[in-house]
Structure formats: C-alpha cells, structure tokens
Image: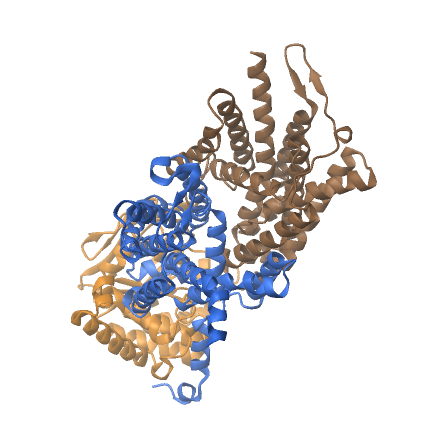
Chain colours: A brown, B blue, C orange
Amino acid sequence: MQLFLEQLVNGIALGSLYGLFGIGFGLVFATLGILNTAHGAYASWAAIIGYFAVVWYDVSFPVAIAVGVIGGGVLAILVDQIGFQPLRNRKTGMLGALITSIAFLIILDSLAGMATNHQSWAFPSRTYPRGMLDLGFMRIPYMQLIIIGAMVFCAAGIYLLIQKTRIGAAMRAVGWNAEAASLGGVNARMVILLTAFLAGATSGLAGVLGGAATSNISYMLGEGLLLKGFAAVVVGGYDDVRGTVLAGILLGICEVFIAQYLSTTFRDGFTYILLLTFLVMRPRGIFGSGNFMRA
Amino acid sequence: MEAILDFWAAYSATIAFGLVNSFIALSCYAVLSAGVLSFTTVMFAAVGGFVAAQMIGMFALPPLVAFLFAGVAGGVAAAVIAVIFLRLETHWMALASLALVLITRVVVLNTPTLTGGVQGMLVPVRVSVLELFLALAVTAFVFYRMHNSWYGLVSRAVREDPSVASTMGISTYRVQFIAFLISGAVGGIGGAALATTLQFISADTYFLALAFTMIASTVLGGSFHWFGPIVGAFVFTALPTTMQAVLPEIQDVAKGVVLLVIMILLPRGLVDPRVLKLRLSRSPKTAEQPDA
Amino acid sequence: MHDTPTLLQLRAVAKHFGGVAAVGGLSTTVRKGTVHGLIGPNGAGKTTVINLITGLFHPTDGEILFDGHNLEAKPPHEIAALGISRTYQNVRLFSGMSALEQVLTGCFLKRGSSLFASFAGLPAARRNWEEARAKSLLLLARVGMAGKADVLAETLSYGEQRRIEIARALGSDPKLLLLDEPTAGMNHAESQAIGQLVHELRDSGLTILMVEHNMGLVTEFCDSCTVMNFGKLLAEGTPRSCIDDPEVQAAYFGRKNDAKRIQPVG
C-alpha cells in the first residue's frame, strides 16, 4: 500500500511536469496559431541556464528556478519576434511559423548540445532539496511536492488569467481572429508578447524542475518533455488548460504504474495508445467542444 | 573526367538522399496542396519502407518492383488514415498527424516480426541513383499532369478557401481524400527509396527528424507548385554537406539559420508560381487591352 | 409576374448562434425568372440567410425548399449541384489564380472531369476542358473583363474583382444566383453596370436574389423584394410598396425619419 501511494504521488509529479510543459504549448497553439516545435528547447535552455547559475555563481535553488523561468520566457519572446513576427500578416497560415520553429529547434538544440558537450548533467546534490517528507505511512520527495505545487500554481494562474481578466479575454479574441481583435481595441502585440513569455516561462519552469528531479540536464531534456507534453495537449484539448493538466497527470500516473506493475517496454506504448484512442473516439480532447464552422 | 568522378564520389550520396527526400517532400506536398497540413507521410513512408524491405528479403525483388508494392501499401494506409483524419478540424488534424508519427514509432518497435522491432531491419539490396532518378521522373510527370488538370485547379481552390470551393459544387472531402491517396502512394515509394538507400531501417528512420526534414523541404522549396518540394529537398539535403565544408563546427546551427532566413525572406518558398503570374499580369500585352 | 412558379421558398427559417437569433423565423419566396432584393439595415441577418441557403450554415429551425428539393442538412457542394451559386459580401476570390482560372474553377461543377479522366487525357476530358475554357472566356467578356483573363485576380481593382466573382458564379450554369451586396464599394456608373448585367442575366432566364443597400438600385432593378430587420420579415412585395411601408421607413431611418433618403436615386 505504501509503495502504491508513493508511486501514485510519483506519477502525479511526473504528470505535473507534462501538464506544466503542455500548458504553454497549447496556449501558443490556441492563441497564436503556432505549432511550436521549439517549445521543448526553452525547457532545455532554462535547465542549462539554471545549472550554470548554480555552478558558476553559486546561487540558491529558488534563484536558479527564477533564472531558468525568466530565461525561458525571454528566449520565447526572442524566438517569437525573430521567427514568427515577420510572418504575421503574410497569410502563411500555420505553415510559415511551423518552419521557422523547426529552424529554431535545430539552432537551439544544437547550441544546447554544444553548451553541454553533448552530455547529461545534474545539479550538484547539495544545491536542490533532496529530502523526503515523512508522513509516517509514506514518504514523498520534496522535489515532487515542489513540482506538483508549481504546476497547480501555474495552471490556476493561467486559467484565471484567461477566463477572468481583460487581457485574458483579449488572448481569446486574438486566438479567434487577430484582425478583429485589434479593431476591437485589443492590443494584439501585447497579447502576443505575453503569450510567448508565459509559454516560455512555464516551459522553462518544467525544464529546471524536471532537470533537477531526474538529474538529467541536456539538450535532450526538451525533446522528452515535448513528446509527452504534446500527448497531454492532444488528449486534454489544446484550448483548455484544465484538460491539458488533467491529461498530463493521467499520462504520468499511467506511465509510472505500467512501468511498476507491467514492464517498461509498454510504458511509451501505452501513452500513444491512449493518444490514438482519444484521436479516434474523442477528437478535440476531454473538455473539447464541437467543431465550430467558419463560413 | 577525373573532376567529374571526384565530384561524383564526393556528392553521389547527397544526390541519392536528395532524390529520396524529393519523394517524401512530394508526398507532403500532395496533401498540402489540397489544404491539409499533415505529417502522416512519415507513417506512409514507414509502411512503404517495411513492406519493401520484407518483399526484397522474401522474394529478392528488384528495388523498382518493390517500390510499386510500397506505393500500393502506402495508398491503402492513406485511405484508412484519411477516413479518420478528414473528420477533424484543420488545427486538430495537424496535431493528430504529429501524434500519428509518435504512434508509428511505437508500433514499429512493438511488431518485431514485421519490422525487426528494436533491432531494425537490414535491406540486402541497394537502389542505384539512376533507378531513383527514373522513379522520381515518373512521379514528377504524374504531378505535372495533375497540376494541369481539373484536379490541380480544384485542389488549389480547396486550399485557398474551402468554404467558397464547396459553394461552387466542389466536394472538399473528396478532393482531400484523393490528396491523401496520392500522398500515401508517393510516401510509400519514398519510404521504400529511403530503405533501399540506407540499407538499414528501424523505428528511428521514420520518426520526427524525417517529419521535420519533409515539411521544411516542402515549404522551403515552395508548396504552390510540384517542382518546389523537389528543389527544397535538394537544398535541404545539400545544406549540411555544404555547411560542413564551410563551417564544420556549427553546421547544424548554420542549417537552421539558413532555413530561418529563407523562410522570412521568401515565406512562399523558392519556387513560387505567383511571381510568374504577377509578371504576366503586368506585361504590357494584357494591360493595354481595353475592357470588352 | 405573380403567376410565375416559385423557385426558392423559406419556411419559418431560424438560425441561432449561441443564444442569439441571427435569423428568427423568416418566410419568403423567390419566383422563377425574377430579380428579388433582400434588404434591411446592417445586422438584419441578410448574409446569414445567404449562408443558410448555400448550406454554409444549417438552419436551427424551419426549412428551405429549392426547385422541388428540401435543402435540409445538405452539404454546400450538393446544394451548388442543385443549381445555386453565389458571390460574397467581401469578394472571396482564390489567391494566386488568374481571372481565367477563377472562372474555370466555377465551371468545374458542370464541365469538370474526374482525376483519372483528365490525367489520362481521355478525349472527353480534353473536350470538357476546352469547352470550359471557351465558356470562361465568354463569361469574362460578359462581365466586361475580356482583356484580363491572364491577370492575377488579386491585382485587379475591387470592382473588377466583383465582376470576376460574378463570372465565376455563372460558370456552374446556376438556376439561382445569390449576389451579396454586388455593388458595395462601387461608384454610380459601376453600380449601374452591375444592375444592367443583372437585368441581362434575368432576361436570359436566370433567377437572382440580391442583398443590396443601394435603394436606388433596388427600386430600379428588382422585381420584388423582402425587407428584413433583426432576423425577421418586415415587409414583402414590390420595391415601391416595401419602401413606402411605414414600418420599413421606421426601421431604416428610425429616429432620423428622413424619408427623402429612400427616394429612388436613379
């Protein structure tokens, strides 16, 4: 029973990483209409920047997180302004930005490979919380609690931002039609920058926390998160923060339990079988609404 | 003569991969030109690749015959996928097709009797550059004929504005279904071409790298004319080789930068029929004629 | 004129978006061989009616009958095949196509060949293509765009694009042509030319339903009309009787009560 509970929390924590990472991916897709393949690179770079901050400047872990989060956000804004902004208003649809995002994926991943000498690093053990919270009947690593807490905080924050604030309404409006939104007095540029920053920052947060928890900081970190975060977005529905989070946690729990009780070879298989099932049975995700028709 | 031989020795591999990637890019173009952004080509290529590898392994077929079987298998796979995917809304279909790429890899890994599973498969025959060239020439001819047919015209209409096209009596479903079939057949051939060029295929052969190469080649070359994907495939294949000669340290970074710069400067790609039509529009011959 | 048979009939057609009724139970008829105007203030639901007839939207309630067929739940391309063709309020030509190609696309419905036939170059397919080409050039000439066949349509002026759009709509030999504000953004002479064209088309046997803002044109060129407001029928009959209707006067000019402005201009 103790093992079961510990594995459950383990799964929730893993899933929280997927969800945290997926929120930004879905947000950019729904609001800006960009299928951003470079979203994983933000996570890799945030983890790498956080690592350098810790190793070179001997900063504390919260500061390393902040550095990674801001770094991820700024990187996302740079990518948006260099790679996506010139294509807006040029009627390239989803295609143009998809290609420039692939260009950035190639650039950022190979630079990350060079920065890390193509090796996998880990935060020095004294620099991040490695203890366990002992509840008597089970023990939970602090890192897992931090990850779950961070995900809940970000998901709730972004959900409330989108649903309850003026800028959130503007984000939804831009997602519907940037031209109409700018006519209606919405500052489309502000919305774009904010969306890009939020996406980069949450991706970065997932990168730093994931890099610390799994002791794997490398240019590959982002790709792993991208595949699973992407699955969470598809299962959960890209235009719904709640769906992404729920699907991420579901995926995390399933992965951990299948690895524990069946075999590790089935682990990835299961994720994608779930994905396929949702594609066929429930297109548009858990909370997805019906197709809207544009005439 | 020696110079030519040297050139051939140095670049024949690049040319072979340029030809192979042309098939893959044309497969992507086939659906894109009917308004469908889809990565499903990777799955069609996997089907074609493993079918060709099995046929060659079992019956010692010559590569070009194996290509035919691969094309048929890819087409069949595409028919199944099209039925599922054409129900989905555009944005959703793009995501779903990317998911299909991930699913394909898992399926390949878990069906070792068909695909060699984790070990992958050796392909005992190597296709020659000449054979690849011939196959591509035939494929390109098919695309040329389609481009100048009713199908070409109607698929462009569906791509530019599907709801307007539908009110003109064009069934967008039907056009896009045909596009998927063509994409499947050409993608299957491309997968077989890849298998018989690499002579070793595994789950990782038909994965994200291929998806990204394919879409980048297609859009880089230009997705508004069938010649675009072929140009794009050669440029994108030659980029790393060229970069290696110039900037070996940062060849990948340079490849990304070149892709970025071209896309920002020429978002419609290197081959753009619109430019030609614009020139035609402005030529004095048409401009001076008065309205009837 | 009222003895002519009905071509299009709307029976209590309603369309709701979310909770909002864009069209709320509209009934009206369009008779064969007439030019029927659909008029009303902005936001009255006119374009929605056009979208409902062409199948881009499906009615929430009510039914639409066309030439003996119930259009209920039919997809747009099947409705087009029954003989309904349209233009759009904001011209929607295909980007990257020449004027000729636009019109050729319109000809596909009646003269197109299957992929296999046109690919294999079967004689019938080649004949279809040549016929469609000849027909397209004829249609371009008819709308006064004879010299512009090879010109990229998006480089033409707004008025010229509208005319190409009409030619494209005529490519499918429709029985009913729906024109959504065909004279928007045109000057007086251009509008008159469009009105003239509409008359010619009617005289050649076509039925036309046009959304129109220009009251002068409505009185001059429409045989009958339907006035809508807030998604509902306000008045129906001859243009003259509609305009004189006090309710129409009130809806159109409300507070201003400026009756002079709806006197025919032409």
Q: Is residue C114 left or right of residue A175?
A: left
Q: Point out residue A78 in the picture as x, y percentages from the top left corner.
A: 67, 54
* Residue in view at x 22 percent, y 60 percent: C7
* Residue in view at x 62 percent, y 47 percent: A41
* Residue in view at x 64 percent, y 10 percent: A137
Q: Quadrant of the N terminus of chain A?
A: top right
* Residue in view at x 43 percent, y 38 percent: B119
Kindly indicate the quadrant of the structure image that contains residue A219: top right
Q: Point out residue C154 in the picture as x, y percentages from the top left corner.
A: 45, 73
Say above or below: C234 vs A280.
below
Q: Nearer the viewer, residue C155 or A40?
A: A40
**In the current view of this chain or complex, which residue is farthest to the front?**
B2
Q: Point out residue B56 in the picture as x, y percentages from the top left corner.
A: 30, 49
The number of numbered badges drawn on the structure is 0
Asked whether residue C257 is in view, the answer is no
Say above or below: A196 vs C2.
above
